[in-house]
Image (spheres, rainbow, N blue to C red):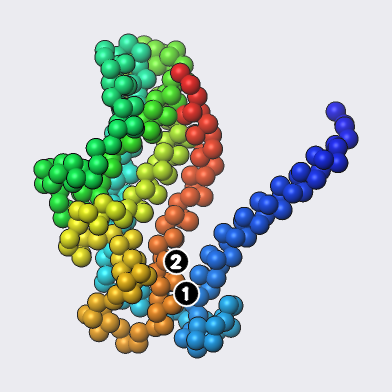
Amino acid sequence: MNYRRSIASRVFDIGNQLFLGTCALAILLPLLYLVLSSFATDAEIDRGAIIPTRYTLDAYRAAFSTPMLLNGYLVSVFVTVVGTVISMVFTTMMAYALSKKDLPTRKFLLFFVVLTMFLHTGLIPYYLVVRGLGLLNSIWSLIIPSALSAFNVILLKNFFLTIPDELEDAARLDGCSDFGVFVRVVLPLSRPAIAAFALFYMVGYWNSYFNAIMFISDPMKMPLQVALRQLLVVEYLPEQDIARLSQLPHPHTLKAAAVVLSLIPVFLVYPWIQKHFTRGILLGSMKE
């Protein structure tokens, strides 16, 4: 049906597009400057060039030749991959169990899951629990304490409630066990939601910083975010790392290269998950 839009509606659309475009530029321009700075030569940085005319890979060579950054990168990759797998296994299994209305003590368990979202014991009990588990100065201290999110469990539980019971009953008639129904029927139908929550966990583990500061004392077990802090805030580069470099690049380019390297995994993974992201969140937010 054709209809004429009012002037107020058109003005709103134009204003909305201008606002969103301004927000996009405010995000993209600093990122573009960061990327260009990471390739700039020392002379370009010294003369304050916003868009360099000469480029070099010296900063990236230095970053990959710096054990502090390279080791932190490997630690973060391990924590992100292993942590996301563990978190998704725990979250999907617990959410599926809580979605079954015939589960004994279901309301009791749901109450305690929700309770953890509102009650926080504080840093000292948190530290004492991790120490009691023997996880201090262990990479697992960056994974185990963050392995389960009550918020994600509740949303994924609501998503599982949207799957018709008839599909599960048909699978059981075909000889599937409860675990077989979960793996062969429920999980394939839940790919959008699983992709969305996997992205949540992945970003959380990749940006892990506070737990590392509290629980890790060995520099070789520090994740990338802590190594970046040493470089960006403290401007600290170990003497043994400097000794391995034939020519130390400009500090600004080295910092820019380190930050760009920390963003690459998210940029590589997000496009594959983004198409499932919105649909997964909307379905998971439906009420029981």
Q: Give the residue drawn at x 44%, y 12%.
A: 166
Q: Give the residue drawn at x 36%, y 13%.
A: 101
For the residue carrying disc 2, how many other residues have a C-alpha within 10 Å: few (<14), some (14-19), or many (20+)? some
Mark 2 lies on a secondary structure that is helix
Q: Is residue 156 left or right of residue 143?
A: right
For the residue carrying disc 1, how many other residues have a C-alpha within 10 Å: few (<14), some (14-19), or many (20+)? many
Marking on residue 120: none
Q: Dots 2 and 1: beta carbons under 8 Å?
A: yes
Q: Nearer the viewer, residue 272 or 39?
A: 39
Q: Position of residue 286 (x, y in %)?
A: 50, 24
Q: Is residue 5 left or right of residue 233?
A: right
- Check disc 1 and report the residue beneath it: 38
Mark 1 lies on a secondary structure that is helix
Q: Position of residue 251 (x, y in %)?
A: 40, 79
- Check disc 2 and report the residue beneath it: 260
| Quadrant in the rendering for residue 229 | bottom left
Q: Give the residue drawn at x 53%, y 31%.
A: 282
Whether 153 is drawn above or below 270: the answer is: above
Residue type, mark 2 in image: Val
Identify the image quadrant of the C terminus.
top left
Residue type, mark 1 in image: Ser
Q: Nearer the viewer, residue 227 or 261?
A: 227
Whether 236 is drawn above or below 72: the answer is: below
Spatial separation of the CA atoms under disc 2 and disc 1: 8 Å
Q: Nearer the viewer, residue 201 or 109?
A: 109
Q: Position of residue 40 (x, y in %)?
A: 50, 80
Q: Is residue 259 left or right of residue 35?
A: left
Q: Is residue 42 left or right of residue 93?
A: right
Q: Position of residue 234 (x, y in %)?
A: 32, 71
